[in-house]
Image (cartoon, grey):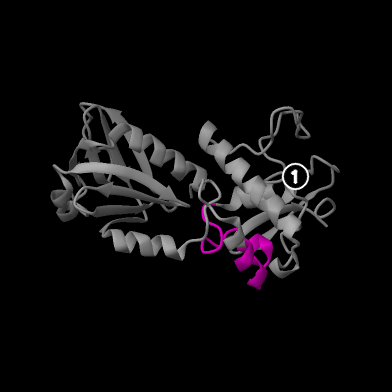
Amino acid sequence: MPEGHTIFRMASDHRRWLAGQTTIVLSPQGRFQSEADRLSGSKLVDVDSHGKHLFYRWSDNRVVHIHLGLYGKFKKYENPPPQPRGAVRMRVIGREITVDLNGPNQCDLISPAEALAIRGRLGEDPIKEDADPEKVWSRIQRSRKTIGAALLDQGLVAGIGNIYRAEILFICRINPERLCSELTSSEFESIWNESVQLLRLGAEKNRIITVRAGDSISAPDGKLRRFHVYKQSECPACRRSIFYWQSANRTIYACDVCQG
């Protein structure tokens, strides 16, 4: 499932390609047909995101809420676009660019009030300039979860997925099994700051990057590593084995020594 940096980057790209234009909206698959008929010929005002949720905002106070889930993806074409490929739920045709949406978990036409309600159910998004870490810290202190589980709880922090949680906690040298209530304010600040920096870097580079330039972390086979602990066999710091187990229904990776 795409993590928050990918959705943030999508919103920025789609806004640049399509916002401010009167568009044609189609549903080649047919599952979004009545909604597409209502939207086609109206202006796409803006595209924004929060965590893993994308919002297309149209004139006349209409919003398309998209959650890609595990299988959803967008395809971009220069106009004129080719025939739809696969089960295209929604096709948006602008002046120069066409965007196809295939296989999303959600693609719904909703009201601004409903969009606001979705946002209200989500935690703060570290990639956003207006994110309030104090709100997150307040909720973290009251949580009975482990920090490893909490970072995947989109109601606490929006946009962090399985790769980022493992990497952030390793960089901060915090064990994923630590209870949220046991974290100090400085430890939370470290987690938040790393989340902000890594998500923004990921959006800028359009890929997850957690090993920074100059770290020169190599795997046992000598190749440079993309990640510190995620799906790795050996800790880059102490060279001990990486442990992995299930946390919040996902596999978490950590070094038992460095994060002990």
User: Range of the magenta residues?
Assistant: 137-159
- Depth check, front residue: 159 or 137: 137
Q: Helix, strand, or loop for circle 1?
A: loop
Q: Identify the residue shown where x is 76% and y is 62%.
A: 184
Q: Amino acid at mark 1?
A: Ser
Q: Is residue 35 left or right of residue 152?
A: left
Residue carrying label 1 = 233
As displayed, is residue 231 above or below residue 21?
A: below
Q: Exactly how many numbered labels are in the figure?
A: 1
Residue at 83% from the left image edge and 50% from the top image edge: 258
Q: Is residue 154 magenta?
A: yes
Residue 157 within the segment the image draws in magenta: yes
Percent x, y for residue 5?
51, 43
- Mark 1, other Cα within 10 Å: few <14 / some 14–19 / many ≥20: some
Percent across and percent down for residue 189 are: 69, 53
Residue in the picture at 74% in, 27% down: 214
